Amino acid sequence: MTAPVSIRSVSHTFGDFQALSDVSLEIGAGEYVTLLGPSGCGKTTLLSVLGGFIDPTAGEVLIDGRDMTRVAPAKRPTTTMFQDYALFPHMSLRDNVAFGLRMGGMGRAARYEVAHEMLDLVGLAHAAATRPHALSGGQRQRVALARALAVKPDVLLLDEPLGALDLKLRRAMQDELKAIQRRVGTTFVHVTHDQEEAMAIADRIVVMNAGRIEDEGPPARIYREPATLFAADFMGEMNHIPARSDGSVVTTSFGPLPGLRAARGDAVLCIRPEALRSGEGALSFGPGEIKVSAFFGTYTRVQVVPEAAPDLVLTAHLPPSEMPEPGSRLTLSADAPAFSLFPTGN
Amino acid sequence: MMRLLPWAYLIVAFVFIYLPVASLVLFSFQDGGLPVPPFEGPSLRWYADILSDGDVMAALGNSLLVAAGSAALACALGFLAAYGLARHVLPGSALIRGLLIAPLTVSYLIVGLGLLIVIQRTGLGLSLMTAGIGHVVINLPLCFAIIYASMGAQQQNAERAARDLGADEFRVITLVTIPMLAPAIAAAFFLSVTLSWDEFIISFLLTRFDVTLPVEIWSMLRSGLSPRLNAIGSLVFLVSVTAVLILEIFVFRKNRS
Amino acid sequence: MSRPAPRLQGAGFVAPALLWTLAFFVVPFLVMGAMSLATLEGRTLVWGLSLANYTELTEKAYLWRAVMVSMEITLTVTVVSVVLAYPLAWIIAFRVPQRWQRLALLLAILPFWTSYVVRSYAWLLVLAREGVVNQTLMSLGLISEPVTLANTRFATVTGFVHFFVMLLTLTIYANLVQLSPNYRRAAMDLGASAFQTFRHVILPLTLPGIVTGAFLTFVLCIGDYVTPQILGGNTELTVPQVIMVQLGRRADFPLASALAIVLMAIVTLVYILSARWLRLDRI
């Protein structure tokens, strides 16, 4: 089962703290959306509003077109997978997964059948009779997923579901989560602070900061053409180059920029390290001195102080075949579509 | 209605919990001869009365002596045992731990009765000392358990560091272990003081001429309700509460921050 | 410089406490056990291996009666205390705002630290014939004659329940707040009503705390002499009261020891029955 979700002008305050300010978001049925941002950005509050654990101060939440803003969690077509999984330690995996069905009044035989199906889906059918404490972190995470999906929710809410796992397991579980979501077709809303996880898993990423949505869209678009400076920085490492616009031409320490326009005032030019290459290009940063050069396997990371702007450090990811010596000179450049420009006020 | 129910329950519960204590304290200020309504006063005459009563004051002094002495000894023994068991591999350590904790599960009456029989058999006289011995028996398990539970790996690493820097065993204990465990030791000490200060049955069985305050109160009880008893009871309560509040404010607060 | 072997050194630290416990707890306990098998002929003590003191328990009605009274009072107190304390702990844990919780808990258990003699006297003050309750009710004109409240089993149970409600509130509260709030959220989220959440999730998860608290209540209640003596009077005697009678008036140490052993046996039995849920290390 699946349904679209529509969040309309939702705001929420905790005492003096504005956790959400006027957030609106449309999520399509069957979509996999991640809410991405640093801690305190409001992503978990937004998830709690969707799950019914928090009544927002203002705004409304519609699921499948029906107003759910003040409906109790039990009565919503949503289920939540909690960060600590909240598996009931006194119940077997089977009873954990069947819990929601039991509350719905389903008979023992029928609910155990569904529980087995769900445990099978996450590869734990053989352990149905064991208790949660016997499981590893990754297995608990699967059981929590099975329990949340067993009641056939329209929308599954996942609160940092992979946060407690080590990096390797995390990457493996991302693929699995995505595969399971494709099979069941349920709308998934997934909260994380890990941008690599968000990119690996989401159909659409919603970047949040200070209670607002900074940017939303497919991962590749947000990475390459972020809407705001915050989104640009949060999605990965970024070179910042101060720039200035007189209304028609944008200029940096490296000269005027071709093909870019901005309103009059100060701005910052952003370029990802992997967009920089050695040699001349459409935008050249001229020669500079290499301060640091380190081999990272799939690339070589160099830090260069350009002669034209000695108080700037440019970071570049060069092909691993290039291994320039620190202290030597290098010319860096980039091609026009690889950078974004953000005004910084005045 | 359903929202108010919990608060109503809370209020009723607090009335129940505080009814006896409030009656005790209120009527200790009674001006008349009976500590019951209607309240006349307030008057401090019963406090003046007991504070000038030699027997009561002697019992109070005895109680403080026994409480402080037995708590200090129980803490010292408990600390040493906890240190030995936490830092050294000993044969049968599970058995030793069980044995040290065992008196917790036996009622005070039985602890007192056993000691009384042995003391009478050996012909030793009953005194404050014998009551103090009994109080160490019941407080030692608590002191041991509290201090043992707080001896974590963090302390052990600090002890290793101190040893590495040349400290001998005595200096390790006095300069590293005890300061790091100070909150737990203080908690054990104040808890023991409170329990010993309030304890009746062991003191009743194991003292004879010099008695502790609860035993003195017990013998005054035979004459029925009296504002003097209210006044003593209020003072006893005040001392216990002070010890508990010291524990709460200085030990647990600090612990949490 | 020679250092003692670590093992010897460790034993040196443990020895004082261990010797103290052996000398003043284990040995007296064994002597008491031996004493329970001795007999009193006239006023002289005869050591032996007689079970006479134990068989007397079934032969003499007042002894058996005391065991029954102790059991009845203790069970009543345990059940009533748990039933009253659980909602109180619940309200403090889940209804009282976070910042006031510690204060509310401290206040709820502060009178716990009154000496038990003083606490029982305070209840006598409240319940006596000319006590606070009777005087208040009479001055309000609700009753014309004082109601008998003190010197009854009701008074004993009230005094005990007062004490153990505070103890149990503490243990149950500690158990409730250490549960992740997500357990409740997860149950509600999966469609459980408030009652179902309590019945299927919170209650099973707090059972160890309840059983531990109930066990403590049982042990402390069945062994207490002061409360039944002051509040119950001599209308019916509990085992500790009978023990004190043996010690005082009759100096019958063998019978007193046998009764003490019986008390311990009852506690041990209850321990075995509840061991599955007990978490004594959490006290």
Image (cartoon, coloured by chain):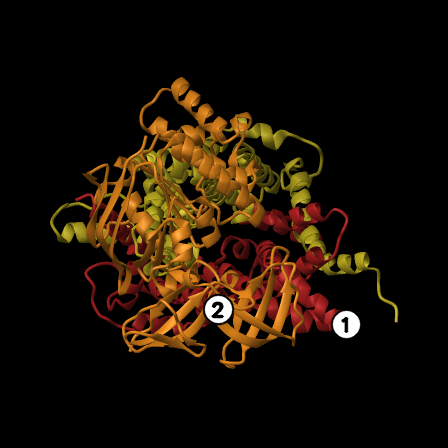
Chain colours: A orange, B red, C yellow
Q: Nearer the viewer, residue A285 or A87?
A: A285
- The quadrant in which residue B159 appears is bottom right
Extreme top residue here?
A109
Which numbered dot is residue B168?
A: 1
Numbered label attached to residue C110: none
Q: Amino acid at mark 2?
A: Lys
Total marks placed = 2
Q: Nearer the viewer, residue C56 or C117?
A: C117
The residue beneath circle 2 is B254
Q: Position of residue B214 (x, y in %)?
A: 46, 60
Q: Which residue occupies 56% across, 47% down?
A: C281
Residue C178 appears at what percent x and percent y? 44, 49
Image location (x, y in percent) of residue A171: 53, 45
Q: Position of residue B157 (x, y in %)?
A: 68, 64
In-front residue for pair A23/A317: A317
- Residue at 17% x, 50% y: name it: C137
For badge 1, the amino acid type reads Asp
